Image (tube, rainbow, N blue to C red):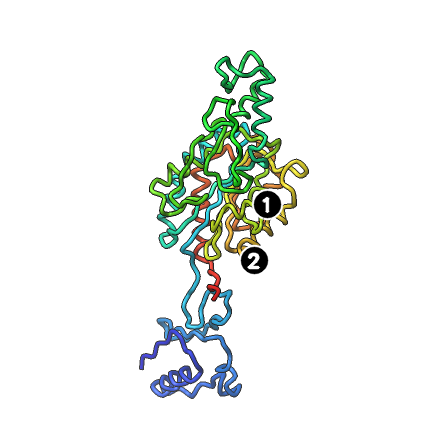
Amino acid sequence: MDCRWTLALSSLAFVSCTEARQEDEGTPPMTTVSESAEGTAADTESSTTMIEDDDDDIKLDVGIDTDDPNTGIDPDGDDMSGCDKVDFLFVIDNSGSMGPFQENLVTNFPGFINTIQQTLDEAQDYHIMVVDTDPAPPADCPALCDQVEADGCLMPDGSCPIINLENPLCQFSCITSLECTTSPGGCNEPVEPEACEIMGAGVVYPRGSDASNTECNFASGERFMDASEPDLQAAFSCAARVGTAASGASEQPMGAIVEAVTPGRPAFECNGDFIRDDAILVVTFITDEDDDDGDGSSGTVEGWRQALIAAKNGDDQAIVTLGLFGGAGCGEDSLRLTQFVDSWEERGLQGSVCGDYQGFFQQAVDLIDTTCDEFVPPEPVG
């Protein structure tokens, strides 16, 4: 008799197969757990796996508790793990030295997202949002334009040149003042900031020097792109060119992350339903300066980490953190940013802001793929 079992759901099935085989082979009856322990094995919630190899050796494997929601196995034995949604948050430094790095990111984004789409073949429902690191909205634009005029930086036609070689003091103020305008070059018509032009809110109209200076008009109608975007590369290029005219004195990438993902914060409310409970969250930040203690984001490395975990309902396995930042002769050494990425262990990846973005994103795809495979979506409420 050839009796092959893949799963014995009860001790009764185990005994029936065993006794039938023993009768065929003329071997003594085998004492089972249920016979020696008065059926206690059948009362447990775990299952038992019997595997017969080519040498007819029976191997037992204690199965998974199917009632444990953390296993990714439902009570019927079906595997519930794996994601079909991914939320991508890009946090991009918009300080004066970031122009080349923003271009590098835009250049490498198509290869990254194409590889994501090919690798995560079941996760084609994505949100992609860009935020900058400027802690101040362009509320000071009128004052900046007044300063430009006071410095004598205005051209005869009333415009503000990006570089005025006759007056070096004008260089910074003219570049910064470009945030005041809807079109590059002029300081005559300051624009009042919109309610959601704040740190942590999705960028939809990058303004200033080296910025897109145009309305991105995402197909989603939100402050983020999604799978309905007809030209995702063009939309991302518009948003990711956040420019180099930050009005703040220091960059705050971690503060931007916290503002973007924390319920109740103004930026979170602006971002609508960007973060979804049943999606994994991939956070990518790019900066050439550290988020200095006392001169950057408030809080601590652990506090930033907990803010992200709270955004994913306590599931730290649903988060991937990717950091491109300075150090090793490229930009500022980034102690706190290094500590932040390291705190995610195998779900954190760091690279040089001056390095090979293509190779970095290829490693990132592998990490995202693993995280997606292992993700167990929460059960729907109601």
Q: Amino acid at mark 1?
A: Phe
Q: Which mark is residue 314?
A: 2
The local crowd at label 2, few if under 14, some if 14 to 19, many if 20 or more residues have their Cα within 10 Å, is few
N-terminal-most mark, 2 or 1: 2
Res 340 label: 1
User: Residue at left 60%, top 32%?
Assistant: 248
Closer-to-camera residue (54/15): 15
Secondary structure at numbered mark 2: loop
Q: Nearer the viewer, residue 218 or 120?
A: 218
Relative to residue 92, is residue 153 depicted above or below? Answer: above
User: Crowding near pointer 1: few (<14 within 10 Å), some, many (20+)?
Assistant: many
| Residue that sits furthest to the right in the current view | 294
Determine the residue positioned at 51% across, 40% down: 131
Q: Secondary structure at mark 1?
A: helix
Instruction: Give residue 336's quadrant in the image.
Output: top right
In percent of width and height, residue 2 lies at 32, 79
Q: Nearer the viewer, residue 348 or 315?
A: 315
367 relative to 145 in the view: left or right:
left
Image vertical order of residue 106 relative to residue 169, above or below: below
Nearer to us of marks 2 and 1 is 2
Q: Residue at x 51, y 19 (%)?
A: 160
| Residue 372 image offset from top left, x and y in percent | 44, 54
Camera sees residue 324:
no
